Amino acid sequence: MNTVKRIAVLVSGGGTNLQALINAQNKGIIKSGKIELVISNKADAYALERARKANIKTAVVSKKELGGSQRAFENNLITLLEDNKIDIIVLAGFMVILSERFTSTYPRRIINVHPSLIPSFCGEGFYGLRVHEAALKYGVKVTGATVHFVNEVPDGGEIIMQKAVAIREDDTPETLQKRVMRLAEWKILPLSVEKVCSELL
Ligand code: GAR
């Protein structure tokens, strides 16, 4: 019998996407995988609190405390992922770019959520609120979110799901960010995780 896939979620901040994954798991929307581990690169990330409340194992790997070494940081991540027999890695507001050495270790096993319709407003330097600032500055009328596999090109891996969100005349980066999360990210991230896990079973 196939057992459900073991999921690790990597976070850096508030963790509303992690919360959407936990809620989806509780509701049975995610049923082909189970969140076994949450890793943060920041010890004070509120996402860790959300994981603890849901009785999910947590870990912190700080690049800063490893002397800023990307290699040591990724080695620590890999050790944790291997020790916990992780099948699928979800980047949910994880603000560290991973090297090709890391991404090629997990081909089609790393999933990221990005707050725009890729290929718009993505790649290095486009993260968090900056993405929405750029969309408003450009004057696009429609934006959204994308869930994609992670490869060596930042935000360049194969797209799994996208959802569009209309921009309003009075939007600020903050109002737009919240609406893109609520209408797009929190919906397509859990659905994508279930899709990828079920296809691996
Ligand atoms: C989300 O909007 C996510 O799409 C974005 O950061 C936010 C994290 O919020 N990620 C990126 O910009 C990655 N390039 P959360 O911690 O509340 O999930």
Image (cartoon, rainbow, N blue to C red):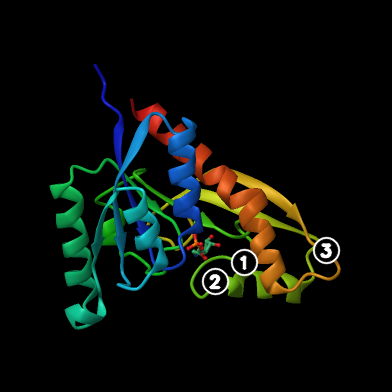
Circle 3 Cα neighbour tier, 10 Å, few/some/many (<14 / 14–19 / ≥20): few
Gap in angstroms between the C-alphas marked 2 and 3: 21 Å
Q: In which quarter of the image is residue 39?
A: bottom left
Mark nearer the viewer, 2 or 3: 3
Q: Which of marks 1 and 2 is nearer the N terminus?
A: 1
The amino acid pointed to by label 2 is Phe
Mark 1 secondary-structure assignment: loop
Ligand 1 closer than 8 Å to the CB at disc 2?
yes
Q: Which residue is drawn at 59% across and 75% down?
A: 130
Instruction: Check disc 3 and report the residue beneath it.
Output: 168
Quadrant of image for the N terminus: top left
Q: Quadrant of residue 34?
A: top left
Q: Identify the amino acid type marked 1.
A: Phe
As rendered, which of 185 and 111 lies closer to the eye? 185
Q: Look at 62% across and 59% down and name the residue there.
A: 116
Can residue 138 be seen at all in this image of the molecule?
yes
SS at circle 2: loop
Label 2, on which residue?
126
- Residue hosting label 1: 121
The reply to whether callout 1 and callout 2 are in contact (CB within 8 Å) is yes
Work out whether residue 117 can be spotted: no
Q: Quick one: label 2 or label 3, which is nearer the N terminus?
A: 2
Tell me where residue 143 appears, x and y as whole percent: 71, 58
Query: In percent of the image, x 44 and y 34: which residue is there?
Result: 30
